[in-house]
Image (spheres, rainbow, N blue to C red):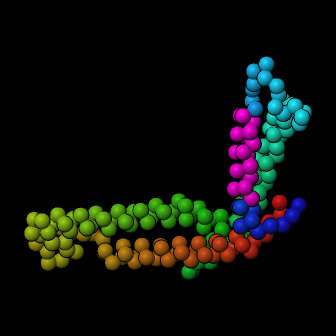
């Protein structure tokens, strides 16, 4: 086993994927031939033998990929990152970024968009948007502070930016054995 950084491991998984793709294309190219055509891989032991070797090579590469991913996953579960006042394992931050942050950002942006549409509608009929106090019967009342929405979006984007930097740093420094 050799130790490499997570960044190197992730690069290797991409290389493995390309190698597998090339081997699959090679196998498809030599999968069959008409009996009357000479085996173009006869010097290498014949197409059947070469294809068998390539199939085994693909299986080995897939196992290497699984081993690398397992080691990355273990490292991500065992190392923590603190962003602002929040400390989580890298694995938890990755889930948060992928499933929570993206959903919340979309939701906040939708809230902002709906309020802007309501504002446009209110203007078109001579009304205004209000917070409910001192409003007229035709005004549209927004039940959420727009500044709070903007602050939440800003905080989320700031957290994501810091997190991305921290993840890059950790990926470049955490070593795994593969």
Q: Is residue 162 left or right of residue 62?
A: left
Q: Which residues are magenta?
A: 12-29
- Point out the image quarter for the N terminus: bottom right
**Is 164 located above or below residue 43 in the figure?**
below
**Is 103 located above or below residue 48 in the figure?**
below
**Is 168 located above or below residue 29 in the figure?**
below
Q: Is residue 27 magenta?
A: yes
Q: Residue at 70%, 50% (x, y): give it.
A: 18
Q: Is residue 32 left or right of residue 150?
A: right
Residue 58 visible at all = yes
**Is 165 located above or below residue 113 in the figure?**
below
Q: Is residue 112 left or right of residue 47?
A: left
| Residue at the far top in the pictured view | 36
Q: Residue at 75%, 36% (x, y): give it.
A: 27
Viewer-proximal residue, 14 or 80?
14
What is the x, y in percent for residue 22?
Answer: 72, 45
């Amino acid at each position: 086993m050799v130790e490499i950084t997570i960044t190197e491991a992730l690069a290797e998984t991409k290389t493995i994927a390309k190698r597998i793709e090339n081997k699959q294309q090679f196998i498809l190219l030599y999968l069959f031939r008409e009996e009357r055509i000479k085996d173009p891989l006869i010097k290498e032991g014949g197409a059947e033998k070469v294809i068998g070797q390539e199939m085994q090579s693909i299986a080995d590469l897939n196992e290497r990929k699984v081993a690398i991913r397992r080691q990355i996953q273990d490292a991500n579960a065992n190392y923590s990152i603190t962003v602002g006042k929040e400390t989580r394992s890298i694995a938890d931050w990755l889930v948060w970024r992928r499933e929570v942050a993206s959903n919340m950002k979309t939701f906040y942006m939708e809230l902002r968009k709906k309020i802007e549409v309501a504002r446009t509608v209110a203007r078109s009929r001579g009304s205004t948007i209000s917070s409910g106090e001192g409003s007229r019967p035709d005004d549209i009342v927004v039940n959420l502070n727009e500044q709070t929405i903007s602050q939440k979006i800003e905080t989320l984007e700031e957290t994501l930016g810091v997190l991305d930097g921290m993840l890059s740093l950790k990926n470049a420094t955490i070593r795994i054995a593969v």
